[in-house]
Amino acid sequence: MSLKIIPYLTFNGNCKEAFALYKQVLGGELFSLSFADAPEEACVPKDSPNKDKILHTRLTVGDFSLMASDCPPHQPFSKPQGVSVSLNVDSVSEAERLFHGLSAGGKVHMALGKTFWAESFAMFEDRFGVSWMVNCETGH
């Protein structure tokens, strides 16, 4: 049996911008479909102002994937709560790079620093409202 658990995020119209940043900071391969790419009867009319919003996107970095979409136009958006995307790395310098790249313009809840369990740890919300944790248990 092969099982992959993949976080799926929903955005309020800024998924394309968010995933451009995530690809820039995290690297990897990005795949995206807009609502305009789907059959009209399946989603939104081709002349809809939402046609260029993201129907589905996937960023794959090694064995890890993060998927998302913009909230469908006929559904109300609600911000995810109680969930964070956790990035675990093996060097403090990589933790610093990820923290600075993803937290810029966001809200830092716990600045990057040493804890009793890690050489470097941080919690923050990026400028798109997604909660992240960066964790480096050992410093190399």
Image (cartoon, grey):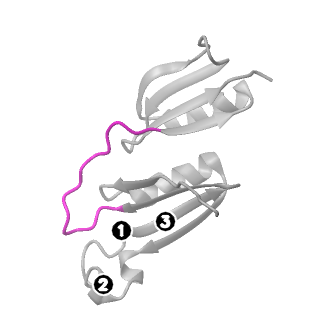
Identify which amino acid the numbered label 1 is placed on.
Lys
The quadrant of the image that shows the N terminus is bottom right
Please name the amino acid that badge 3 sits on.
Answer: Thr
**Residue 23 picture location, percent across and down:** 59, 54
| In-front residue for pair 23/67 | 67
Q: CA distance from mark 1 to mark 2?
A: 14 Å
Label 2, secondary structure: give it. Answer: helix
Magenta-colored segment: predominant secondary structure: loop
Q: Secondary structure at mark 3?
A: strand
- Residue pictured at 32% horizontal, 59% vertical: 13
| Residue lying at 68% horizontally and 55% vertically, measured from the top left | 63
Disc 1 residue crowd, few under 14, some 14–19, many 20+, Cα 10 Å: many
Between the C-alphas of marks 3 and 2, the distance is 17 Å
Does residue 62 appear left or right of residue 57 in this picture? right
Magenta region:
70-84
Q: Which quadrant is home to the C terminus? A: top right
> Residue at label 1?
53
Work out which residue is located at the far right of the displayed protein and give it.
Answer: 140
* Front position among marks 1 and 2: 2
Which residue, given by chain and number where applicable, does mark 3 sit on? 57
Q: Up-down: is 97 above or below 34? A: above
Lateral position of residue 53 relative to residue 27, left or right: left
Is residue 67 in the magenta section?
Answer: no
The percent position of residue 91, horizontal first and vertical second, equals 74, 28
Q: Earlier in the sequence, mark 3 or mark 2?
A: 2
- Mark 1 and mark 2 lie on one chain; the one further toward the N terminus is 2
Relative to 36, does residue 83 appear above or below in the rendering?
above
Q: CA distance from mark 3 to mark 1?
A: 11 Å
Rendered image quadrant of residue 52: bottom left
In the rendered image, which residue does mark 2 sit on?
A: 42
Residue at 39% over, 62% down: 69
**Which residue type does callout 2 highlight?**
Ala
